[in-house]
Every structure is written in structure tokens, then in C-alpha cells.
Image (cartoon, helix red, strand yellow):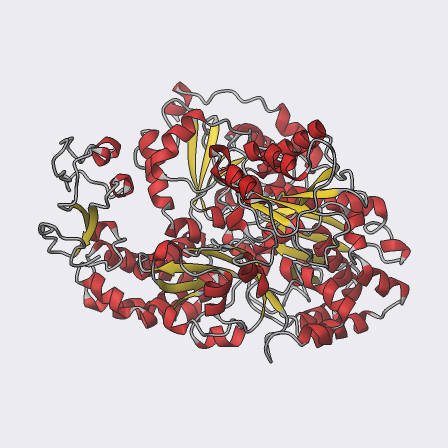
Amino acid sequence: MDALQSNPAPAVDLSPVDAIVARLGKAPHALIPILQAIQEHYHYLPDSALRRVCQLTEISPATMEGVSSFFAQFRHKPAGKHIVRICHGTACHVKGSELVQEAIARHLHLSTGQDTDATGEFTVERVGCLGCCTLAPVLQVDSTTLGHVTPDEVGVMLQEATFLPIGSIQPDALAYQHASESQTEIRVGVGSCCIAGGSQAVRVALERAVRRLGANAVVKPVGCVGMCHQTPMVEIVRPGTSAAEHTPSILYTRVSADAAEQIVRRHFPTRGLFTRLTSGLSDSIDRLLLGDQVDQSLRQRSDMRDAPICDFLGGQVRIATEYCGHLDPLDIDEYIAHGGFTALRAIIDNKAAPTAIIDQVTQSGLRGRGGAGFPTGRKWKAMHDSPGKRKFVIVNGDEGDPGAFMDRMILESYPYRVLEGMLIAAMATGAHDGRLYIRHEYPLAVLRIRQAIDVLRTRGYVGASILESGHAFDVEVSEGAGAFVCGEETALIASIEGHRGSPRLRPPFPAERGLWDYPTLINNVETLAQVPWILLHGGQAFAAMGTAQSKGTKVFALTGKVVRGGLIEVPMGVTIRRIVQEIGGGVENGRKFKAVQIGGPSGGCLPTELADTSVDYESLAAVGAIMGSGGLVVLDDSDCMVDMARYFLQFTQAESCGKCTFCRIGTRRMLEILDRLCEGKATAPDLTRLELLANQVKAGSLCGLGQTAPNPILTTLRYFRHEYEAHLRGECPAGRCKNLIRYQVTDDCIGCTRCAQQCPVSAIPMTPYAIHTIDDSICTRCDVCRGACPVDAIKIVTGKSLSKIPAHAKEPAHV
């Protein structure tokens, strides 16, 4: 107390807090939005601001402390001018996010436990997943997202980059100038991955070039194209081409803003005549463009169906992602022109009975796409049959799985499709109130959904009477606050009500007693995005796709060590091998396909020997994995499976709400064993204890988080036990675990000193024209030297007896 009196906290202007409470309300359920608004203003939660909220509202200090300390989004100490968020999702982890984190800490001279540099310029935070997995490793500075970050460039990046301030994402234009019958569309993706890759700058440059050259074209923003590995992309679509025709178009990939005008000039000569292109351009022009230094990243395809694009698109069936890459996300008239709201209008015009709607959904065999796979028709019927004057529909967009971005893409690219599915569900179940619960880490998805709701409200789709049907329905958006456990439906409900996100025992199920004890239907984003198609084409049409018990299609985020990563939609029953090898193009950099991690932290790691496993609920369960929400991360032979198990358990242990002992304590004890394994300190009995604990936690935990947290451990023990046994010997076969490896220089070294110049800890003496050496006592295993070596003369060796590499050795004994 004396210390506080002698060093009082700086005074904080509390007038913004008063305004925030006046805007958001005084009820307990307003707590999380209030905290988010306060943190957005101050960059943290000042104690005086929290006390002021308690004075102004019905929120108690105990509730304030419990909620603000529970959710990872909130911080209680001042932050720097810029917030650096480093993504540690699965794809980022396998591509070196820990090395990026360490490099930033070194650059900012951060000691252990410190997150803000001495100048107060930067605060560094770990984030579970930013949802831009195909650009891994990813980090975000304020509102600027950067992909493919490497440890050696972070210093320059933080010094020279210009960052958009937090909250600077501006609403998209709700309309653009539509192309006439004689005009060409120049399409540019405006999803998060595209924007992170620079598509907004490309879009601005294209619009400027079209105006300057007087081109007979319109630059059109479109949703995610799915080929996230090729962003930014520009597609030239000739007049008269419809979204359903799949006629040849010109597609440019990895386009820079500098290339935009050259693309416009190529297709729109200054004389103003449109050049009809079919099979490509003349060799001389191709050589000129591809040879230009500015346009090295420019690619041209005369037909989107040509390989390798054909392979990526050919095996897909679009339902939830119908008209992928064709529609402006916020253009409601274009959505309607392509069949949007036809299903909803048919229900209203035909005065379809709720039971008839539910029957179609039941016949389709649609199962929840959020992970559990519960039959959607049964859930809707239970909700319909529950008595209650007030009912809710909640869209679960809290996509917390690291390595997954399906829901983000659907919300950003197809907001009207999700909302149409939600409106159909409301009419089928008798609900009049709706909530969309979306991750705070997805600001563009939140923004677009809010804009779409505003449009629907002005058009009469939302409000006192849906399209004059007499069925009232209104909807709000609630943002998550960084708790993976809130993907569980009862924890999600608690969060909306303003409580800690702790699951509760069921029954009663939410359909009986949910939000504020009213009957509540909760469906995943992808589930509802498929409903309009089902109602339009009939349940039997959907059921004709997939397998006997897993019907329809599934959207996957294909990421990791794969050549063509992106967002795909495939029929249920397709094999893992076809997804990885045919659609994904196989493993990148010529490495060996080792495994896939499917289902996120709740899923499992399956070896290449099981690559012919059918991707459906039953087949995956039979081999120890689960479908999950749809993250599919490809691993190669440089990935350590013990490290992967530890990575996922670190995530689930940190995300445990702590309510039940099995999950709270059991995950911690398992993590301690995995830490010992990765440090070379484990003993043989540890494997027995690890397996026993995993089965106990799986059987005894309260909710799905704890029940599935052991899956990555159990599957890696089952299929990669030899790697665990190698770690008991002090070896990491993949060369990943830092305590079990060292870096050594072979006789191939040419003495160029590049490794010494770039070593951040001066572990390599500068010895020009001589074979270099690495001081192992100083080396931090940051991997910078290996990336800098032009002749691949630096190798990783592993094992307790790390002997010197013999002369002229090309590879160590264990790599």
C-alpha cells in the first residue's frame, strides 16, 4: 500500500469510459463489449476504468475481475504504441513461428517475461491463430497483417514498415459500378489472405490504371477464390461470361501493385479496342512481361482449367462456397441474381410449414460442421419442439482451431448466404432473436457481417416481419474475446451473457435451456451456409453426395508443408491422399510426405501410410482422429511428432477453463512429460504414464476440449511411437527439438562469412576463407545461419553423443 501511495498510477481520463457505457448499456451482458471498447481506446484495461464501469453498471467487481482475467484478449498493464501479434497457429508453428518470436524478442531486447520494449514502442503478444494460415508464418502489427515472415527480416520490418493503427479497417463500399454487357470485369480478391498479400494496393492501382487509360472495364472486389497460395490474384473476365459457364478467363497470380498498369495495358490497348484473348498472348509479350524485374511475380493462365489450377479446382464441389471468386461479398443484388434468398422466398411464398423445412434438412443428412457432427435436422426438431415465448438462433463463428480459417472465409466472402441460412433456421424453429458469435481476431469478418445485416434491415429481410411474412427476427453480433473453449456451445452462451466462458453439464441442452435460459439453436457457420442450397435443390440432392453416413461436402483449410495451400470444398469420402497429392500438389520443397494433422487440437496426426483413409466422420474416428471444424495441416519429414503433440497440448492446456480437474491438472501433467521428452530428460516409465493420463483425461473431462485434448498424443503414440523412443535416447530424428540438436559446419564451407554476419548472438567467429565453427555454448538454435549459407554447409545433428562431422560428410548420422 505504501508503495502504491509513493508511486501512484498515472491519472486516466475516464470520460471515454462514461461514453462507452452510455453506448453499450449497463446490463451484465454488456461486460465483454465494454471491456473490448475500453481496451481499444487505451490499449489495455486501466484499473480506474474498470472501477468506473462497476460504478456505472450492474456489473460487480468480482465479475469484472473474473471475466477480464479469463479471456486472453484482455491485458491489465500498459502496452506500447504498436501491438505486434505473432501467430502460433499450426501452420505457423511448423513453418517457424517460434523462431520469428525469438528474433523479435532479440531485436527489441526483451528479457524473459517482458513483452514491451524499453522505449514503449512495441508490445509483443502470442496469438493462437490469425486465420491466414497459407501465408505462414504470419504476424500482425496493429491492423497490418504480414505473411511469409522470416527471422532475419523482422528487424528491418519493424523499423521501416508503415502500420495501420488498430481499428483502422474501414467499411467496404456497399456497391461498385457494375460492368455493362460490353465491359470486362477485372476481379480482385478482398479476403483476409488476399489483403495480407497486398490485394488492396493492387485493387487501387488497377482502378487508377483503368481511369487513366480509359479502359472499358470495371474493377470488381470478390470474395475468397480459395487459391490462397497464389495471392494476390487478378482475373480478367470477358463480357458476357456468367459465373456458371466456366469459360476461359485470364488469371494472374502473385500480382504486385507495380504490375497492375501493365496488366491493364496488356488487355486494353490505348486505342480503346478490347483485345479478345483465348489461348494466351504472343511469346514476345510474354517474354517481356515475365522478364521484367518488376513482374517476376506475375503469372498468366489462358484457361483456369489448365494444370496445375485444374488439379486444385477439379476435385472440388462448391455448395457452402458456391460462386467462389465471382461475387462481391456485400452486393446483395448480385447475390440475389445468382439464386440468393430464393430458398427463403419460396418458404415464405409457399407458406411452408416449419416441419416441412426441418424434414428437408433431415433428409439431406446434414451434420454439424463445427466438429461434433451432430445431425442438424435432429437439433432443429428439438428446438422446434421446445416450448417458449422467446427463442434464439446463434451462429457459432468462434473458429478457435489453430490452422483453420473456413468460417472466417465464409463470413467474409458469403455473409448473405450465412444470414439466409440463419433466417431459414429461425423460421423453421420459431426463433425471433439471433446472435452471431465471431472471433475478435477476425475484424474483417465482423465488419462485413455487420454491414450485411444493415443492408438486410433496409431491405426488409431483418426486422419486424421477414419479407412481410409476419415472422419477426432481429440479429446482433457478439465478438469473442480469445478463449478457445468458447467454441463449446454452453461456454459460448456464458460468454454472450457476460460470464467467464466455462462449459456446463448437459442436459439440459441449449435447445431446451440456452441463452438466458431460453431455447437456443446453435449452428456452425459452414452448417448454415449449406442450408440455402439444400432447401433450393432438395435434401435428396445433398444426400446423394458423400458417404452413407457423412453426406454432402466439407470445407477444409489445406495448409502446412503443401505446394497449393488454400480453402477447398470437397465431397465427403474423398481420401486424404487425393486432397494432399492431387488438390494440394504434394509436399513442398521436395520433402517427404510424413503425416497430416486433421481436426485441430481436438484431432489427430495420421501417417502417410493412412493417406487412403476416407475423409468422413466414421473413417476418421476409426483411426483415432476427428473431422473437427476442417483444418488439415500437411507435415513433412522435418516435423517432429513429439513436438507436434507438445504443441497441441500447450495450446489446450492454456485454453482449459479450469473447471474440471481432469482437464485442468491432467493436461498439465501430460505437458510436463512431453517437455521432458523434448528436453531429453524423460525415462521409459514416462511413456506409460503419458498414455494412461491421456485416456483418463479423455474419459473424465467435462466438455469437448478436455475429452479431445489427448487425441494428438494418442495418435502420435499409436503411429509414431518410434519417435518417442528416440527422444528417450536423447535423439530427435527430425532435428526439431532444440535441446536434442546442435549445429555443425561441414568441410563444404567456403568461408564466405555470411553465417557469421547474420548470427544474432555472435556464436560464429568471423574467419574469412576458412571453415567456420559454431560455439555450441552460445548458439540458440535460431536457424538463421543455415538459411544464410549459400552452399548448404551447415547441418543439424542430434543425439546425446554429438560427435564432430567427419571431413567431406554430406549428412550427419542422424538428421
Q: Nearer the viewer, residue 66 or 19?
A: 19
Write the residue at 13% across / 53% down. Answer: 809
Quadrant assignment, res 388: bottom right
Write the residue at 55% across / 37% down. Answer: 198
The answer to whether residue 702 of the structure is visible from this angle is no
Write the residue at 33% across / 30% down. Answer: 107
Q: Residue 279: where, in percent of width, then height?
A: 62, 52
Q: Residue 482: where, in percent of width, then height?
A: 52, 47
Write the residue at 64% across / 74% down. Answer: 545
Q: Is residue 111 left or right of residue 600?
A: left
Query: Is residue 198 positioned above or below 599 on the image?
Result: above
Q: Residue 604: where, in percent of width, then height?
A: 42, 66
The answer to whether residue 102 of the structure is visible from this angle is yes
Q: What is the residue that sits farthest to the bottom in this orientation?
A: 548
Q: Residue 212: where, in percent of width, then height?
A: 69, 27
Query: Is residue 263 positioned above or below 421 on the image?
Result: above
